[in-house]
Image (cartoon, grey):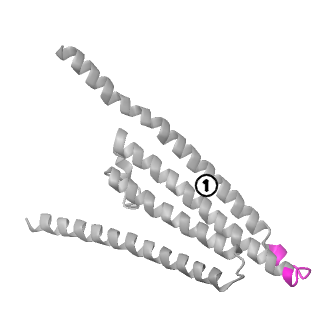
């Protein structure tokens, strides 16, 4: 009976490698999103000289500028989404498979890319997703037509809520950093 239990537990522990499918798929999707956003950026820059054309006047110039700003926001959105997928892939790998030793040793590794718990992963993903939502809100605000004072009031309310969300995520992050610094000080005092 003990042998069956040991075999079952080994198989159960080995089943965590199924997460590699999600890691590889997330990494591949992140690379695709980085590629798409980079191609979009290239095309935006390649059309930059059209803005300097003397033939572009009045409403056409305003429309071109508005369209360019919208494309910049879409590019930022694409890069942020690619970043979410990359963080997700790295986080799943660290949580289920193994620690990423080169990231642990690297001086340039961001604390965003080193994940030690599910809460770390959730926190980092939530912050990047919040940034994506802010960018999307900005994208819609740029193209929004303000016809009534209520439209402006709703825009201001949305901006206030974004500010509140940023404040709350920053406060939580600041408290975590202070707690970690306190723990390091306590260890060094001993």
- In the image shown, does 61 or 45 lie closer to the viewer? 61
| Above or below: residue 87 compared with residue 173 | above
Q: Where residue 4 appears, x then y in whole percent?
A: 23, 15
What residue is pinned by disc 1? 34
| Above or below: residue 8 compared with residue 130 | above
Q: Where residue 103 appears, x then y in whole percent?
A: 38, 52
**Occupied quadrant, residue 166:** bottom left
Question: In the rendered view of the protein, which quadrant contains the C terminus?
Answer: bottom left
Assign the magenta stretch its main secondary structure. Answer: loop
- Element marked by disc 1: helix
- In the image shown, does 128 or 190 lie closer to the viewer? 128
Q: Where residue 161 appears, x then y in whole percent?
A: 48, 75
* Residue segment shown in magenta: 49-59
- In the image shown, does 127 or 177 lie closer to the viewer? 127
Q: Residue at x 58, y 60 (%)?
A: 79
Q: Residue at x 20, y 15 (%)?
A: 3
């Amino acid at each position: 009976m003990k042998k069956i239990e040991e075999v079952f537990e080994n198989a159960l522990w080995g089943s965590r490698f199924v997460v590699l499918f999600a890691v590889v798929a997330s990494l591949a999707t992140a690379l695709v999103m980085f590629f798409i956003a980079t191609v979009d950026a290239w095309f935006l820059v390649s059309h930059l000289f059209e803005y300097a054309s003397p033939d572009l006047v009045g409403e056409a110039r305003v429309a071109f500028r508005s369209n360019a700003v919208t494309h910049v926001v879409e590019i930022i959105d694409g890069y942020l989404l690619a970043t979410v997928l990359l963080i997700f892939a790295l986080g799943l790998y660290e949580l289920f498979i193994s620690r990423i030793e080169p990231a642990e040793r690297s001086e340039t590794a961001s604390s965003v890319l080193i994940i030690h718990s599910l809460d770390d992963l959730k926190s980092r993903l939530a912050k990047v997703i919040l940034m994506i939502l802010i960018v999307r809100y900005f994208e819609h605000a740029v193209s929004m037509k303000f016809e009534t004072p209520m439209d402006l009031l709703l825009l201001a309310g949305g901006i206030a809520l974004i500010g509140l969300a940023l404040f709350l995520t920053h406060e939580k992050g600041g408290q975590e950093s202070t707690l970690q610094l306190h723990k390091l000080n306590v260890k060094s005092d001993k």
